[in-house]
Amino acid sequence: FLSYPMKFSALFAVATASSVLATDPVEVLVCVEALCSACETFVTDYLVPTSQIEGMNDIMDVTFVPYGNAKIDMDSKTVTCQHGDTECFANSYEQCAIDIYPDQTDFLPFVGCVAETPTQFKMSQDQTFEDCANKAGLDFTVIKDCHDDADRAWDLQVAASQKTPADHQYTPWIVIDGELYDNSSHDLQGAVCDAYIKKGGKSDACNNESEVALK
């Protein structure tokens, strides 16, 4: 049995929690390519650090698409990447990791590690991706099996091409709840929080905005 004040407090707490949980996370589409220096900077300086702020992963749903400015030929089943075959090689590793580990708390540490690795070590070298998988706590064996499976790797390239907006003009191309994000703002946390609050959400993660801004 609860006294009236206690009962009211309990109901208020449930209602408050429910109102917050009822707000859908902000959809964050991140279109990149593995050997793009601007993409590497965005991932290492803004995307990953923002995801590490307590509560941010609860209010944003990241769709990370390693494809960028690549061109796909469905007839010949070939992909031509902006920075050559080595970029396709690296994109494929990231696509596989994301497909196998779709939770952003799993794949973001992996792609963050790849992004901070010097380009020369990402060029057709499995070791880089194995090191990053181990660092992120992912099973490299299953990721490599995916990468080396021509049919599966092709299907993931096709899926990535379809997720990349046809009208994108550069990389990284970031869309937050349907609105193109201004990369020059250097404030991903603020943009996500603004979008979340706009649709009625509340989060402690937004109480101290710009923890990761303007480096």
Image: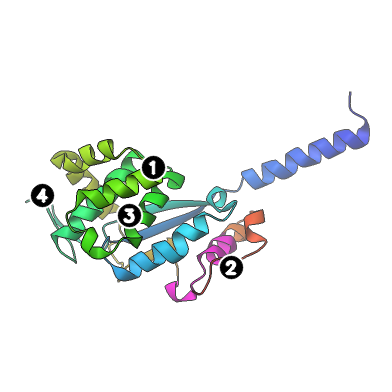
Residue at the spot 81% in from the left edge and 36% down from the top edge: 10
| Amino acid marked by disc 2 | Ser
**Helix or strand or loop: what does disc 2 sit on?**
loop
Residue furthest toward the left?
Answer: 76
Residues 196 and 190: in front is 190
Residue 169 in the image: state x and y as whole percent: 30, 71
Residue at the spot 46% in from the left edge and 46% down from the top edge: 105
Question: In the rendered structure, which segment of residues is drawn in magenta?
Answer: 182-195
Residue identifier under label 2:
210
| Amino acid marked by disc 4 | Lys
Mark pair 4, 1: CA separation:
25 Å
Quarter of the image where one finds residue 70: bottom left
Residue identifier under label 4:
77
What is the number of callouts on the image? 4
Mark seen at residue 65: 3
Residue 57 in the image: state x and y as whole percent: 53, 50
Q: Nearer the viewer, mark 3 or mark 2?
A: 2
Residue identifier under label 1:
102
The disc, 4 or 1, on the residue closer to the chain's N-terminal end is 4
**Helix or strand or loop: what does disc 3 sit on?**
strand
Q: State yes or no: discs 3 and 2 in contact (Cβ < 8 Å).
A: no
Magenta stretch: dominant secondary structure: helix
